[in-house]
């Protein structure tokens, strides 16, 4: 049987690494992993090819399509810093919107299927959790850029696209420059540092292990359109941090409740977002672990990783 050719952009990131990890253990796919770094951060050394790629470089993207000719492109490349996006708007728009348009056009030209990762920040946070057909209304520049990327995927990609909305990603990865929320909590609590976490930001945190499985189900079932992929548990970030402390056996008294008004941020954050995943459960057989089980699963993965490397930042 001929292998399905998949290209991943942003493969050195949190989700990209998990996707590579799951794909290389299957014989169904031929994988090209790409990211802006000159070398891979991935612990896997076999089962895929790595090529540096700046998704904002239009000619470089065209060249790699001509060379690899993918059947699926999973776009994990993004500028994800919400405050950075508010300040560096040109860079944010270039990566989160213009680059998506270019990828979608190349996919359309080559007959490839674009799976584009988006965010719950396309919503204003007044009526969460949100379904796929709820009306977007972003309140910060990051959310606006992600909505523009969605629209570019729809328009430039013809009919061969899937948009995956997710939120608060956490997981196991190597050499990540900016820690995810779970790692941020762990780093501070392990150093006996007090942290203040918002009680008025509600989300459905997404374990990359489950999220990657959901994305591969989209490939398997050849699904198009918009899908929410996240965890089921809907809770405040403060409650999430307390659960992290519980599962990892750390001092939860270091975690202090706060509200957004007490700690002004450069970019506004929506209060009540999160995602309803009924469509994915029904059409993709998507079954994410309950949040406590997912954190326990991550706990064991991180412990296993720590026994295999002496680097303190192996998964941060």
Image (cartoon, rainbow, N blue to C red):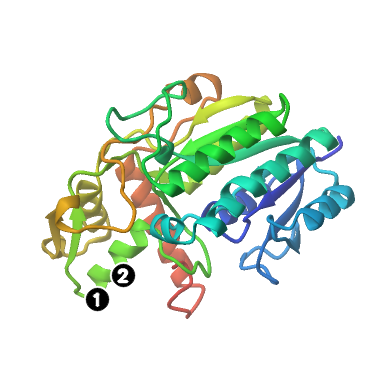
Q: Residue at x 64, y 35 (%)?
A: 153
Q: Residue 235 location, x and y as percent?
A: 24, 39
Q: Quadrant of residue 194?
A: bottom left
Specify whether 173 is left or right of 138: right
* x 56%, y 59%: residue: 91
Regarding mark 2 in the picture, which secondary structure is present there?
helix
Crowd tier of the residue under label 1, counting other residues whose Cα lies within 10 Å: few below 14, some 14–19, many 20 or above = few
Q: Is residue 309 above or below residue 244?
A: below
State the residue position of label 2.
187
- Reading the image, the residue beneath label 1 is 191
Q: Are marks 2 and 1 in contact (CB under 8 Å)?
A: yes
Taking the spot 35% from the left edge, 57% from the top edge, the residue there is 181
Quadrant for residue 157, please give it.
top right
Front residue of 140/228: it is: 140
| For residue 32, above or below residue 106 | below
Percent x, y for residue 75? 63, 46
């Amino acid at each position: 049987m001929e292998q399905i050719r998949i290209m991943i952009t942003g493969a050195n990131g949190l989700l990209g690494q998990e996707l590579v990890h799951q794909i290389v253990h299957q014989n169904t796919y031929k994988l090209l992993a790409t990211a802006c770094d000159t070398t891979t951060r991935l612990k896997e050394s076999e089962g895929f090819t790595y090529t540096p790629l700046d998704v904002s470089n239009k000619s470089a993207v065209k060249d790699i399509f001509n060379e690899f000719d993918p059947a699926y492109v999973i776009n994990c490349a993004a500028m994800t810093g919400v405050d950075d996006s508010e300040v560096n708007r040109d860079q944010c728009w270039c990566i989160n919107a213009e680059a998506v348009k270019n990828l979608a056009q190349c996919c359309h030209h080559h007959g490839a299927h674009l799976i584009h990762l988006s965010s719950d920040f396309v919503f204003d946070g007044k009526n969460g959790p949100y379904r796929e057909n709820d009306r977007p209304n972003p309140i910060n520049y990051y959310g606006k850029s992600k909505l523009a990327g969605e629209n570019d995927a729809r328009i430039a990609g013809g009919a061969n696209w899937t948009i995956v909305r997710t939120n608060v990603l956490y997981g196991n990865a190597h050499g990540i420059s900016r820690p995810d929320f779970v790692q941020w909590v762990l780093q501070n609590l392990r150093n006996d540092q007090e942290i203040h976490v918002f009680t008025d930001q509600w989300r459905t945190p997404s374990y990359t292990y489950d999220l990657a499985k959901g994305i591969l189900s989209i490939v398997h079932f050849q699904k198009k359109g918009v899908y929410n992929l996240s965890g089921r548990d809907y809770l405040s970030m403060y409650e999430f941090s307390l659960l992290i402390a519980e599962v990892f056996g750390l001092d939860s008294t270091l975690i202090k409740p706060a509200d957004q008004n007490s700690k002004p941020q450069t970019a506004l954050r929506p209060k009540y977002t999160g995602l309803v995943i009924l469509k994915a459960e029904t059409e993709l057989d998507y079954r994410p672990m309950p949040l406590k089980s997912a954190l326990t699963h991550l706990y064991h993965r991180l412990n296993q990783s720590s026994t295999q490397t002496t680097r303190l930042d192996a998964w941060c």
